[in-house]
Image (cartoon, helix red, strand yellow):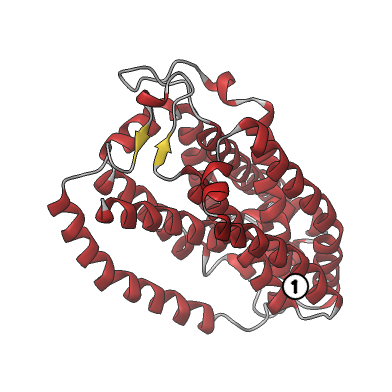
Amino acid sequence: MLLQSIWFYVWGLLWAVFFITDGFDFGIGTLFPFLGRSDQDKRQMIGAMGPLWDGNEVWLITAGGVTFAAFPLVYAVMFSSLYTALMLILFALILRGVSMEFRGKVDSPAWRWVWDACLFVGSVLPALLFGVAFANIFQGLPLDQNHLFQGNLLTLINPYGLLGGVLFLLFFLVHGALWLAIRTGGDLQQRAVRTAAFIWLPLLLAAVAFLVYSAAATNLYANYLARPYLFVVILSAVAGLLGIRVFLARQQYFKAWFASALAIVSATFFGIIGLFPNMLPSTNSEEYSLTAFNASSSPLTLKIMLVVVLLFIPVVLAYQIWAYNLFRTKVGEEAAH
C-alpha cells in the first residue's frame, strides 16, 4: 500500500508541475488578443513563452505516462469517460503549437489573424477543460460496476465542473500576466501588471466559491476533517493568493509569479489530498470507485518505475532550470522576431 500511496502523490505532483509551467502559456495565449495591441506586442508575447512552452508540456506527457504505467485501469476509464474533453484538449494543444510556428511564415495580416485566433482557442480551451475535468473527478463520475461511464459530455457540464473550469482559467490568466510582467518591458509590461491586478479579485472570489461549493458537492473535506493538520494546504493556497497582490503592489513581479505558483500547486493538492485514496470516485456506489489500491500496477512495476523516476526526474528538472535561466532576460523589440 505504501508504493501505491507514493505513486498517487507523485501523480498529483506531476499534474501540479504541469499546471505551474504550462499554465502561464495558457494564460498568455488567452490574453493574446487583448494585450497584443500591435504585431510587435504579439511577437513579444510569443517570445515570452516561445522557447519554453514545448518543454513545459513534457510534464503533461509525464503525468499521462505515469497514469498509464502506475494506474492503467484509471488511464483506461479516464480516457473512455472523459474521451471527448481530452480529445478537445489534445487538438487544442496541437493547434496552439502550430499557430506559434506558422503565424510568422507569411507576411499577411489575414494570415496572422487566423493563427492568432487559433492561438487563443488553443490556449483558452485547455485551460477551461482541464478545470472542468478535474472538478468532475473531485465531484465523482457516474461509473457502474464495470467502471463504465454512464453519461456524456453534457454530464460534465454541471455547475461545479464549470466553476472548476473558470477557476483554472483565472489562475492561468493571472499566472500568464505575471510572466509577461517578468519577461517584457514598457507599455506591454504595464498592461500585463494592470491585467493581473484586475483579474486577481475575481480569482480570489472564484477560489473561495470553489472551496465552499466543494463542501456541498464533494467528499473532499473528509480527509481534512480526519486530519486537521492538512488544512495547512488550504492556508498555503490563501497565502499564495494574498502574496500575489502584495508583491504586485511592491512591483516584485518574480515573487508574485512564485506566489501564483504556490497558489496553483496548493489548489491542486487540495483536491488530490481530498481524493485520496480515490482516483476516480463513483457517484453511483462507493464500491465502483477506482482507487490507488484497486487500480494500480503490480508492486514490481511500481518499484521499477520509482527507480526510473528517481533517476530521470532530476535530469528533467535540471534541464528546465537551465532553459529558464537561459531565457531569463526580457523580450525586447530586437529579440521579438
Q: Which residue lies furthest to the left in this view?
A: 300
Q: Position of residue 316 (x, y in %)?
A: 36, 71
* Vertical side of 136 occupied by 323: above or below: below
The residue shown at (78%, 76%) is: 247
- Give the quadrant of residue 254: bottom right
Amino acid type of disc 1? Ala
- Give the quadrant of residue 39: bottom right
Q: Quadrant where the C terminus lies?
A: bottom right
Q: Position of residue 87 (x, y in %)?
A: 46, 34
* Vertical side of 140 occupied by 154: above or below: above
Q: Position of residue 157 (x, y in %)?
A: 62, 25
Element type at mark 1: helix
The residue shown at (44%, 74%) is: 320
The residue where tag 1 is placed is: 181
Left or right, residue 134 beside residue 145? right
Of residues 192 and 317, the one drawn nearer to the viewer in this rendering = 317
Q: Can residue 99 be seen in this view?
A: no
Q: Where is residue 19 in the image (x, y as percent from the top left)?
A: 54, 56
**How crowded is the residue under tag 1: few (<14 C-alpha within 10 Å), some, or many (20+)?**
many
Left or right, residue 317 beside residue 242? left
The residue shown at (46%, 41%) is: 90
Q: Can residue 28 be seen in this view?
A: yes
